[in-house]
Amino acid sequence: MTSPSSPANPAAEAAARTHDRRRWFALAIVMVAAFMDLVDVTIVNVALPTIQHDEGASTGQIQWITAGYALAFAALLITGGRLGDIFGRKRLFLLGITGFTVASALCGFAANPEMLVASRILQGSMAALMVPQVLSIVHATFPAHERGKVFGLFGAIVGLGAVTGPLLGALLTEWNLFGLEWRPIFLINLPVGIAALILGSRVISESKAPTALKLDLVGVVLVTLAMLALVYPLTQGRENGWPVWGFVMMAASVVIVVVLIAYEKAKARRDGSPLIELSLFKVKSFAAGIAVQTVFGVMTGVFFLTWTLYMQLGLGWSALRAGVTGVPFSIAVSVAAGISVQKLVPRFGRKVLQAGAVTMAAGVLIYVWESGHYGLSIASWQMALPLVVMGLGMGLIVAPLTDAVLSEVPREHAGSASGLINTVMQMGNALGLSLVSVIFFNVVDDHMKKGAGNAAFIDGFHSSLLWAAGILVGIFLLMFALPRKPAVTAVAAGDDEATEATDAIGGTDEQDGGQDGEQDGEREAELVG
């Protein structure tokens, strides 16, 4: 297979791609990697109460098991894409999948909660090297006329992962294979990762960007420090009695952001390759879209963790029952996502996204009423209605949102914009997970002290749901700044016109060089993240 950066004749290259049958084996391998990342995010949530019980983990450590992964993934996502452009996408993919597999083994054999948290942070870092290469490899391997079909397959993988992850996590936890309890949720990655590594080294062709953007390691460090200075005290503050140093750290995060902005401006003037392209924020729809992505990430981080804790710790349900209860939600998200992009958004534009925010908020409020009305005796089938409504609302938002945010961004900055969108989504998720201490565990503790027993978890869940509803109202209002008729790209549409729209955003291998790996890899992150 020919590297996209080498041939002088694009037509000959496209013909060579079309006749090389190995490209379908390469596609299967990178799809497996994408599936591993997606499932690994969802598979962990359902096992968290079991991990807490078996390992004696604190509530802060439980939050870090998920937030640490999200934070590491977000901090290194753009850099991972640029490393692939510079050193080779195949090389970085294989390095990432090797590290991800090793980190999975460390998670599975973790001797204590501290080791598990550290291993999850390593796992997120390795995912940030692996995931951005996936669609970069697809772009370099498949001609433009085949990419619509490939993107459609990715959409199916995303839908399958959304349903499979919680169920697989529940089954592996319940089965207690070989007496390993929760550990198989991580160890299952070992045979898959080893097989993908061996086969990928044989069938994936190497490709690089002709002119890749430079690394901004100082920007990465500043972004990471800013997030840690905010997330760490929010996560640990409750367990330490909200000490003064926590508030000092949160104030310091603002100072670090100011330093980051000044540095990124200087970096842009110096070599034109900042981690964050600040000029993008002059585009009103992009600035509003970044705010929407961030707060949406916060909302999902808050809801999914507290929902799991509510079902298993509050209601006393098994991991399997909790996993099965979430299936209607996952199916509703998948169905609504497909319909929103293919049918609704082209006709109604941003109203579809706003309808999604309203629908999801309605589902949240139904959940508030049902959980209060039925209390500790609520049944799984009674949760189906609010979960389906919430899932439909989420599906109307998540699929078309990135295209809406990017539709008014200048083409030359589309790669940077896409990377930033997915980065802030993950950072918002990490922030939401850290806020669980404030809006869930604080309420649970207060009501436990008053003798509420397990009913305290219902009150904590109510608090989290009301926060989620408030955030969704804010999202609805912010969406007025989005374009009335956002574009729909090949990721969702899958036809020739849509493929051209994707190329307009990400460029072609010959024309846009360094933008390719970044844009394609980050759109993959949007699909699986």
Image (cartoon, rainbow, N blue to C red):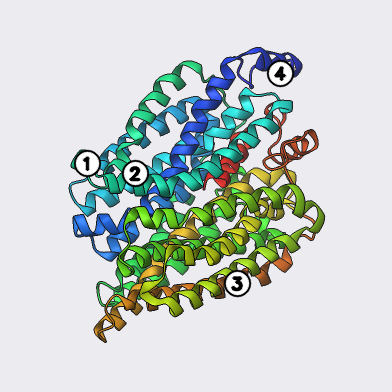
Q: Which of marks 2 and 3 is nearer the N terminus?
A: 2
Where residue 179 appears, x then y in whole percent? Answer: 19, 42
Give the vertical position of 265 relative to 239 (above or below).
above
In the picture of the structure, the residue carrying the numbered disc 1 is 109
Which mark is nearer the camera, 1 or 2? 1
Which mark is nearer the camera, 3 or 1? 3
Where residue 34 appears, x then y in whole percent? Answer: 49, 37
Q: How many marks?
A: 4
Which mark is nearer the camera, 4 or 3? 3
- Residue 386 sits in quarter: bottom right
Q: What element carries label 4?
A: helix
- The answer to which of 483 and 322 lies nearer the viewer is 322
Question: Label 2, label 4: how many angstroms apart (C-alpha)?
Answer: 38 Å
In the picture of the structure, the residue carrying the numbered disc 4 is 14
Q: Earlier in the sequence, mark 4 or mark 3?
A: 4
Q: Earlier in the sequence, mark 3 or mark 1?
A: 1
Which mark is nearer the camera, 2 or 3? 3
Mark 2–mark 3 contact, CB under 8 Å? no
Q: Which amino acid does label 3 sit on?
A: Ala
Please state if 249 lies on the left or on the right of 110 as rendered.
right
Please state if 274 lies on the left or on the right of 51 as rendered.
right
Q: What residue type is labelled 2?
A: Leu
In the picture of the structure, the residue carrying the numbered disc 2 is 122
Question: Label 4, label 3: how many angstroms apart (C-alpha)?
Answer: 49 Å
Q: What element carries label 3?
A: helix
